Image (cartoon, rainbow, N blue to C red):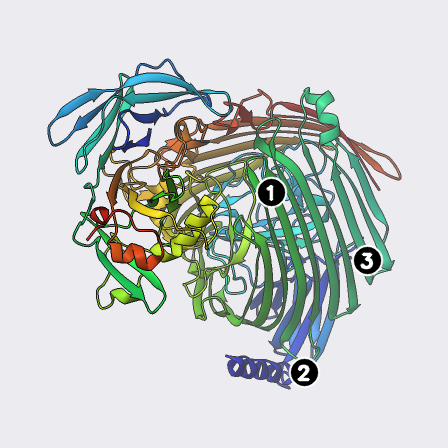
């Protein structure tokens, strides 16, 4: 049986091999080959065998393939041995999400409190498993750049009332610029009465899992993950309303 | 339902106080052993009128009999019972007279030319298909490791009775499972009556009067189980003198004592047995048999007067042991039974009705623990009562009974502690019509309410017996049976004998079965009897554990339907000092592929053992459960003289179904990119092939025993030597897939035992 996943963010793919055997320890010498087939093109990659020491000291077999999988493609990984039944796993990678530039400049105020920017990832039919938001700010006194990263899952980006009557899609996020400022100041060890850091830009990275994750024939478990990232600069109005220092006028989004 | 029961009680009581018609006479009596004054149930009582007309009956379990509606005149009363000299007496009954007699039978000292295998039953019982009436001396013929002859060892000689191994104490009777058998001791239900070592039950032969074994088609007086009834009646006790016995042997040592508390009226009888095999097996066998078990029994029995009796019975049994498992991490099982009951019977002097009342308390506890799974336990207690009214009017005997019982359950099978209870009750009617001695018909009807399903079930029963030619009897029996409380156990692991008792699944129909039986019994030669029985049982809503192999200990409850069919042949006879018997059973048990109730929240696709293998061709929708023994053969011969008894027994059983394992693998689930599958060891799991598609090797074994009796003035001494598994056949018990360790059933075990009795 095969356990692992394909990752578009990696140029080397791994899969752990387990065999049905008559004793507790794995036979690491059995003649087994692993290959992957890109179903759309028929391209074949032969994976290499390696031994790894497991956490309990026993040996395990880890096969690796030197390639980066394409988004939206379907791959079948096959393990074959002369006297063992062939095992196959198949995964279809999600499409690469793209940040819609037309939405990054939308802002709204949640009542009379927080300045929020609405962004939307397209080609996304499911909520990403993981999302990170990185603030790039410049310290006014020194001019140095600092990057502060927050986890930006559903907890930090709930449904935003001011979007009504629109129904937010899976890729819609509310970027809580004003709320996040306190976190930024704490990370920079700056007081609220000191000159505000200049918001030079935002970068978001999301991980999207394939639909076949954990669905295949047990006990094999295989899937795939696509990582996407995008950078933008919010509109000057949003930066100013949220309380950050403004970058050069030509840098603002809008 | 309550109003129906009240009306029925009113009618029954009204009938009981109405005097017999003034112009008819009445003869009642009690049959007892002349020496011990013990009641002799089953004694044949025949009343012959001057014109030659005969009326016959049999003494009940208290030795009582009754003839009512007699015309005045002269009669001859004849009482007979195997092992006793026939008693004959003449009497005269006048108009409206009521006579009561105590008939004392003398034990015969002459050797019998022919062993009569079947005794006459009680008025309610007819021998024939599905019924065996077992006297205690039959139990002693079976070779055993010690001098404590036992019911369990005898039952395994019967065709249609299957055991999966010689350990565990599980009897599968004509396709039914152990938890579908109703075992009674003096009317008290016992949840687990068989010890871990298969030779022994909680009933040594020394305390038994007789056993009524119903392998199917039992009458309306029994209910709550769908496979069989084993109805154990213990001795009423010697009311003349003190008796006792003590024995010592490697497996089991015992002490029995009987005291006439009030001579001719009250006796107290007790028995204590305990195993010593755990201590002696290392020296005897070179290996340890890790079992400790025992039982205690006591009975108080009193003839309150000539027409009423009272008895109280108490039973306690326990078992501790390790079955299968890995040497360092065995599976530990502990079991404990308590059963207490009281029985009162009364034969009113002015009525044709016999009245009986019973009440009981029964409790069972078992726990199971192993290295690989958390401890499981199951505790069940039951309390119940019954009243029975029997109208004894030749040629029709009518019985009506009212019963009620409640059971309380406390268990944890791995998904948290559960507490629940059930209540059931109802009534039954039985009639025995025997217009001529060669034909009888016994219809019955049982009305039963169950709280778990909210249903009222109506279960018809019927038995017909016909003897067209002397010595050749045809019988047929059948009926509908239900069971509210169920015992769940691991169908797949033979060494996992833990049973979880619980109510049937709420708001779903209770398990049920329809029995069809037919058979013939006849003397084919002088001293040789042949019995042929065929049966078919259709079972519905059977319930058992199914395991999720991927997660190991998670349980689901599976429900399915099934059927059992078979043909049992039995031949018994004697020639001079030799007695022999042979039995062959041909059977098939099939269960349908189960559906699942979602107990525990898992959905059916998670249950790997039942998922079809896409590489296999389409299979049938059924499978053979692990007690489907296709062929079973048991042969026994014994030689008895005044001082010596030698017995030999050979048993054979074709292979039982089991689930073959494809192998072991490591489970390393990867559910998200954060799961470390590179170096995580994972959990070992077993991949199983199609459920119960393979067959184990055949089982066979020979046991022999030889005993010498020394008779002295004050006591008797018996010395016995025996060998179990005389040619040391390695019959497989268990195989551990992870370690590759195989466990076998009992090896060759020689033993020497001594018993002294007075």
Can you tell which mark lies on residue B96? 2
In the foreground, A48 or B540: A48
The chain letter for the residue carrying disc 2 is B
Q: Which mark is residue B267?
A: 3
Considering every residue shown, the one lying at the far right of the view is B714
Label 2 environment density (alpha carbons within 10 Å; few <14, some 14–19, many ≥20): some
Distance of label 1 from label 3 (alpha carbons)? 39 Å
Q: Is residue B284 visible?
A: yes
Residue found at the far left of this picture: A41
| 10 Å crowding of disc 1: few (<14), some (14-19), many (20+) | many
Quarter residue B299 falls in: bottom right
Q: Could you confirm whether marks 2 and 3 are on the same chain? A: yes
Residue B456, placed above or below residue B621: below
Q: As drawn, which residue projects farthest toward the front? A: A141
Residue at 33% from the left image edge and 69% from the top image edge: A111
Check the image and report above or below for A45 versus B479.
Answer: above
Marks 1, 3: nearer the viewer: 1
Nearer to us of marks 1 and 2 is: 1
Find out whether the residues at labels 1 and 3 contact each other: C-beta distance under 8 Å.
Answer: no
Give the mark nearest the N terminus, 2 or 3: 2
Q: Residue at x 59, y 41 (%)?
A: B169
Q: Position of residue B427 (x, y in %)?
A: 53, 72
Which quadrant of the figure has residue B398? Answer: bottom right
| Chain under numbered label 3 | B
């Amino acid at each position: 049986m095969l356990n692992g996943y394909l990752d578009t963010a990696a140029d080397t793919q791994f899969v752990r091999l387990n065999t049905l055997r008559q004793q507790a320890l794995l036979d690491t010498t059995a003649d087994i080959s692993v290959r992957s087939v890109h179903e759309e093109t028929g391209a074949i990659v032969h994976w290499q065998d390696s031994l790894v020491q497991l956490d309990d000291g026993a040996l395990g077999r880890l096969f690796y393939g030197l390639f980066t999988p394409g988004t939206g493609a379907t791959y079948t990984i096959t393990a074959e041995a002369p006297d063992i039944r062939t095992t196959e796993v198949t995964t279809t990678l999600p499409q690469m999400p793209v940040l819609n530039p037309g939405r990054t400049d939308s802002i709204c105020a949640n009542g009379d409190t927080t300045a929020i920017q609405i962004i939307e990832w397209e080609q996304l039919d499911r909520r990403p498993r993981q999302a990170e938001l990185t603030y790039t700010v410049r310290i006014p006194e020194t001019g140095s750049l600092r990057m502060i990263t927050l986890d930006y899952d559903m907890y930090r980006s709930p449904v935003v009332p001011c979007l009504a009557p629109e129904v937010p899609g899976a890729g819609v996020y509310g970027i809580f610029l004003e709320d996040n400022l306190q976190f930024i100041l704490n990370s920079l060890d700056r007081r609220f009465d000191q000159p505000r850091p200049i918001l030079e830009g935002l970068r978001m990275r999301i991980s999207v899992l394939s639909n076949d994750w954990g669905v295949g024939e047990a006990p094999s478990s295989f899937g795939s993950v696509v990582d996407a990232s995008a950078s933008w600069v919010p509109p000057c109005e949003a930066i100013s309303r949220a309380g950050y220092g403004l970058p050069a006028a030509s840098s603002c989004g809008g | 339902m309550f109003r129906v029961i009240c009306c029925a009680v009113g009618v029954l009581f009204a009938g009981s106080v109405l005097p017999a018609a003034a112009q008819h006479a009445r003869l009642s009596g009690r049959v007892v052993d002349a020496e011990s004054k013990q009641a002799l149930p089953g004694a044949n009582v025949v009343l012959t009128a001057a014109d030659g007309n005969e009326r016959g009956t049999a003494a009940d379990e208290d030795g009582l009999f009754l003839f009512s509606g007699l015309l005045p005149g002269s009669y001859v009363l004849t009482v007979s019972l195997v092992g006793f000299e026939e008693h004959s007496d003449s009497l005269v009954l006048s108009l409206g007279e009521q006579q009561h007699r105590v008939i004392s039978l003398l034990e015969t000292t002459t050797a019998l030319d022919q062993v009569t295998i079947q005794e006459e039953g009680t008025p309610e019982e007819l021998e024939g298909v599905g019924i065996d009436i077992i006297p205690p001396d039959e139990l002693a013929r079976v070779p055993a490791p010690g001098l404590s002859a036992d019911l369990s060892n005898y039952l395994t000689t019967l065709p249609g009775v299957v055991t999966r191994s010689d350990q565990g104490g599980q009897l599968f009777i004509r396709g039914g499972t152990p938890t579908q058998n109703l075992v009674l001791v003096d009317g008290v239900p016992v949840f687990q009556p068989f010890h871990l070592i298969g030779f022994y039950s909680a009933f040594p032969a020394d305390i038994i009067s007789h056993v009524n074994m119903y392998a199917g088609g039992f009458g309306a007086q029994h209910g709550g189980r769908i496979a069989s009834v084993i109805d154990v009646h213990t001795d009423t006790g010697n009311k003349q003198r003190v008796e006792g016995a003590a024995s010592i042997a490697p497996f089991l040592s015992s002490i029995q004592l009987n005291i006439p508390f009030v001579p001719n009226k009250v006796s107290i009888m007790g028995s204590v047995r305990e195993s010593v095999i755990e201590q002696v097996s290392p020296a005897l066998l070179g290996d340890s048999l890790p079992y400790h078990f025992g039982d205690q029994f006591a009975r108080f029995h009193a003839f309150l007067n000539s027409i009423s009796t009272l008895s109280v019975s108490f039973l306690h049994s326990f078992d501790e042991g390790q079955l299968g498992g890995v040497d360092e991490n065995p599976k530990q099982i502990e079991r404990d039974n308590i059963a207490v009951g009281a029985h009162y019977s009364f034969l009113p002097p002015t009525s044709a009705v016999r009245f009986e009342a019973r009440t009981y308390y029964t409790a069972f506890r078992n726990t199971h623990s192993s290295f690989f799974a958390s401890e499981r336990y199951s505790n069940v207690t039951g309390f119940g009562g019954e009243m029975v009214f029997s109208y004894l009017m030749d040629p029709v005997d009518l019985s009506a009974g009212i019963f009620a019982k409640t059971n309380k359950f406390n268990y944890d099978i791995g998904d948290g502690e559960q507490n629940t209870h059930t209540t059931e009750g109802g009534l039954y009617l039985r009639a025995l019509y025997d217009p001529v001695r060669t034909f009888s018909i016994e219809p019955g009807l049982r009305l039963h309410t169950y709280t778990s399903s909210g249903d009222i079930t109506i279960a018809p029963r019927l038995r017909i017996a016909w003897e067209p030619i002397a010595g050749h009897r045809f019988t047929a029996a059948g009926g509908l049976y239900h069971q509210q409380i169920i015992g769940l156990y691991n169908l797949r692991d033979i060494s996992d004998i833990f049973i979880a008792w619980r109510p049937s699944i709420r708001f779903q129909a209770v398990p049920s079965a329809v029995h069809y039986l037919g058979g013939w019994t006849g003397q084919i030669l002088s001293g040789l009897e042949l019995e042929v029985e065929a049966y078919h049982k259709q079972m519905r809503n059977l319930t058992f554990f199914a395991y999720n192999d991927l997660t190991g200990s998670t349980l689901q409850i599976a429900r399915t339907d099934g059927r059992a069919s078979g043909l049992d042949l039995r031949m018994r006879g004697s020639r001079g000092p030799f007695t022999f018997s042979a039995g062959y059973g041909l059977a098939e048990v099939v269960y349908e592929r189960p559906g699942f109730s979602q107990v525990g929240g898992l959905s059916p696709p998670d249950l790997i053992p039942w998922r079809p293998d896409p590489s296999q061709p389409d299979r049938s929708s059924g499978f053979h459960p692990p007690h489907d023994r296709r062929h079973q053969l048991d042969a026994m011969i014994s030689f008895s003289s005044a001082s010596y008894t030698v017995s030999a027994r050979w048993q054979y059983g074709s292979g039982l179904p089991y689930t073959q394992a494809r192998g072991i693998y490591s489970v390393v689930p990867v559910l998200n990119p954060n799961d470390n599958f590179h170096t995580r060891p994972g959990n070992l799991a077993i991949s199983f092939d199609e459920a119960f598609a393979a067959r184990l090797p055949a089982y066979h074994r020979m046991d022999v025993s030889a005993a010498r009796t020394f008779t002295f003035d004050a006591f008797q001494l018996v010395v016995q030597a025996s060998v179990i598994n005389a040619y040391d056949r390695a019959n497989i018990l268990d195989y551990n897939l992870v370690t590759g360790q195989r466990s076998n059933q009992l090896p060759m075990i020689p033993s020497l035992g001594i018993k002294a009795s007075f």
